[in-house]
Image: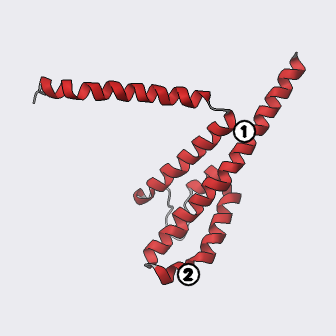
Amino acid sequence: MAVSPHVISAVMPFRVNMNERVKKLINLFRRLSLPIKLVVVHTFIILVAMALYPTDIFIPDAPYDDIYTIYVFVPGIHIYMIGVKLSHQLFPWLLTKMSHYSASVLCIVFIPGVIGIIVGGLQWFVIGKIIVLFRSESQARSR
């Protein structure tokens, strides 16, 4: 089945504009400082993990199916535990407001994810600042 030349001419400007947009986004990302880059990448990974929840790729088999494993690795288990503790406190109240499934999804995926974005983002920002500080100190010593 051949594609009409009219369809190709209609799609090509969008493709060119998309390539330009991607290049602009890459250039913008390159100009960011290291701490901001780390926060952006961390936040992107968490948001992608939240979006992929319906695929069940980050959920282990029972009896560990209440752990969203990507959060153990990306923000870290120490931050994941903060989100889990908050989720355990909110779960009984959420059950009075919504279905069991919705409350479970909020407590397993979204509450720890938001905590991971906020606290984990702060963690990666501080790590980036420390790396920048060490780099500047080592450059000052080498002069």
Residue at 43 percent of width and 78 percent of height = 99
| Residue tagged 1 | 128
Which quarter of the figure has residue 129? top right
- Is 51 positioned to the left or the right of 111 in the image? left
Disc 2 residue type? Trp
Q: Secondary structure at mark 1?
A: helix
Q: Which residue is mark 2?
A: 93
Q: Position of residue 81 (x, y in %)?
A: 67, 64
Q: Is residue 107 visible?
A: yes
Marks 1/2: CA–CA distance: 38 Å
Count residues near mark 2 (Cα–Cα under 10 Å), then give few for <14, some for 14-19, many for 20+.
few
Q: Amino acid at mark 1?
A: Gly
In the picture, measured across the screen, residue 34 lies left or right of residue 112, that is right
Q: In which image quadrant can residue 132 be found?
A: top right
* Residue 96, disc: none
Q: Position of residue 32 (x, y in %)?
A: 62, 32
Q: Quadrant of residue 90?
A: bottom right
Q: Earlier in the sequence, mark 1 or mark 2?
A: 2
Against 130, residue 142 (above or below) is above
Q: Residues within 10 Å of mark 1 (few under 14, many from 20)?
A: some
Residue found farthest to the bottom: 96
Residue 136 at what x, y percent from top left? 81, 27
Q: Residue shown at 58%/41% (left/top)? A: 41
Left or right: 123 in relation to 98: right
Residue 140 lies, with reference to residue 111, above or below; the image says above
Residue at 56% of width from left, 82% of height from top? Answer: 92
Q: Residue at x 39, y 26 (%)?
A: 19
In the rendered image, the vertical position of residue 72 relative to residue 30, given as above or below:
below
